[in-house]
Image (tube, rainbow, N blue to C red):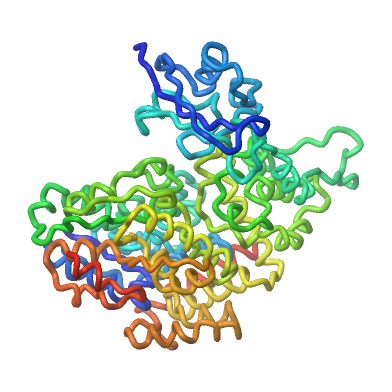
Amino acid sequence: MTAQEAVFRILRYNPERDASRRYETYRVKIDNRMTVLDALEDIKHEQDASLSFRRSCRSGICGSCAMKVNSLAKLACKTRVVTEVENHGEVLVEPMDNMPLIRDLVVDMNEFWREIDRGTPWLEWDNTLEGSSKENLLTNEQQQVSGRLADCIMCGCCFSDCVSRIFDKNFAGPASLAKVHRLVADPRDKVGANRVPALVGLGLWACTHCYFCWSQCPRDVRPVAAISVLRALSFKQGDESHGARHVNAFMNSIERTGMLNEATLYLRTMGWTTIRDFDLILKMAVKGKAPLPFPRPVPKIDEIRSIFRLAHEVKEK
Amino acid sequence: MKYAYYPGCVAKSTAPELYNSTALIAQKLGIELVELTAASCCGAGVTNEGNSFLNTVLNARTFAMAENMGLNILTICSTCQGVMRQVQWQLDNDPKLFGKTNEALAEINMKYQGRVKIKHLLWALIEDYGLDKLVQQVVKPLKGLKIAPFYGCYILRPVEALQYESHEKPTSFERLITALGGEPVEYDGKTKCCGFPILFVQRSTAFEMASTYLNNARQAKADLMVTPCPLCHISLDLYQKKAQSQAGFDINLPVIHLSQMVGYALGLEPEKLGFSKHMISTAKVLREL
């Protein structure tokens, strides 16, 4: 254990006193085991009692101390200071994104909770199940499907770092959709897959697969993977939104030629609105980069079509 | 150096400059590319939302083809790289899926053994060719050029599947730019989403993403943006003017492919590398060089 010093640059804002957000620098004696939360406590007790932040369990369970550390949302209690210093030279601490700031590192999480609520995040008890008057146990296999999703501690890290949410306030966000999948996968829920049709309205197809929710989740919930499963269910249920049409066009193109045909993909997904990009298509043609409307299939296309046939059979089963 | 070459769909259709410039730099550096002409599309993170098993088997077939050739796979598209590595990671960690996938492949007399490595050109240049050796090949250093690397998503995340570098503080792209004599520019957005995956679904949101990060690079005084992903290139170059008019501010930032940047530094003709194929003109940047 070596004693050393780390520089903390912390965003400060007190609405009663500050006209705008500012950064303040603190120097903290650290050791190898110290977490960002430990350091914030030290600063609060020894240097500046006015510093505000949320914390409770200190062991990665309650999710209270979520904040941005060096630009990404993390739990302060699970983040080691030395790692941050190694990677970034300093520890930049800011409040989470995508939620209004109340003071210093404390954000108003109502927006996050409202989005969770939009997914009706409670179990609708199926009382027709055998033994449902008493406790209703899941088998190990059933538990494995929803287990990872049930590990969510609602800390808001995924919501903070979600690129889609920054630009699209209708997108309910990763945690909300992961929670829906947790219930869809739970055999005790009587709504089950009937929860899926409402999801297009929650922005099911607005996720870009940026994978920040996967990388920043302190519990490894992997919301983006849950969103992909929900999309697959929606697609199977006959979803006709642009997102589902895009999936359909993609699969058709690969089955026919083995490759993605951008011309037909565009037409099949966008329909008549393709006309908006007529100018672009012309420019592409001039530069010799417009896609061919009828490309030849790749060699051994029969193998690819066999795989389609097999995979559809497996899915039907 | 010899690879089973997987150029991906976009390099074979709307980004011919990526395909051609890769062929030119490979020739110049003595890298042999044996193209997997019978491979299918990787699914681009879309096919798995229609049928995830289909997506797994299609990619496993590509892996098996490379294994039959005794070669590792080289990609030039971050999305192909990310999707293929994710499928491989799932197969390597799920014996049941591995078995089921090989049962399906057996129907077409193929077998995935789990041996093949999948590498993006960026990684191959660093790991296999070596930046020290590459520096010696540079005849036209990118001197004085401020270059914004746009990593995007699929070449970085999820880190568990890609197993290459930290997504929090990646350095591979910056090291390559520096080796070629350029100056990497730091800006907010280099590891964010270009907007492409939702371009056909929520066009205005996609435009906002592209214009925001392009503008951040512009504000950081970048002369040029470089991307390892042709899908990012569609969003950032092909649609830049449309994104710009929606945003209501001027961006006009040239965006080129990684292979073109390498090719230029190796002394290849900009015209042959396809510098005139972009929607945002690269003429000013080339003049300044």
Please tell me which residue lies in front, A116 or A26: A26
Picture coordinates of residue B38 (x, y %)? Answer: 34, 73
Instruction: Residue B232: name its quadrant.
Output: bottom left
In the rendered view, tell whether residue B248 sits above or below residue A131: below
Q: In which quarter of the image is the C terminus of chain A?
A: bottom right
User: Going 47% across and 82% down the picture, which residue do you hit?
Assistant: A263
Residue in view at x 17 percent, y 64 percent: B289
Pick whichever, A125 or B162, lies toward us: B162
In the image, residue A239 above or below residue A221: below
Position of residue A209 measured from the top left corner of the image (x, y, whole percent): 52, 56
* In-image side of B227 versus B33 (left or right): right
Q: Nearer the viewer, residue B158 or A236?
A: B158
- Front residue of this view, candidates A149 and A279: A279
**Residue B252 appears in the picture as rendered:** yes
What residue is at 38 percent from the left and 27 percent from the top?
A85
Q: Position of residue A153 (x, y in %)?
A: 66, 34
Is residue A310 visible in the rendered image? The answer is: no
Residue B206, image x and y in percent? 53, 65
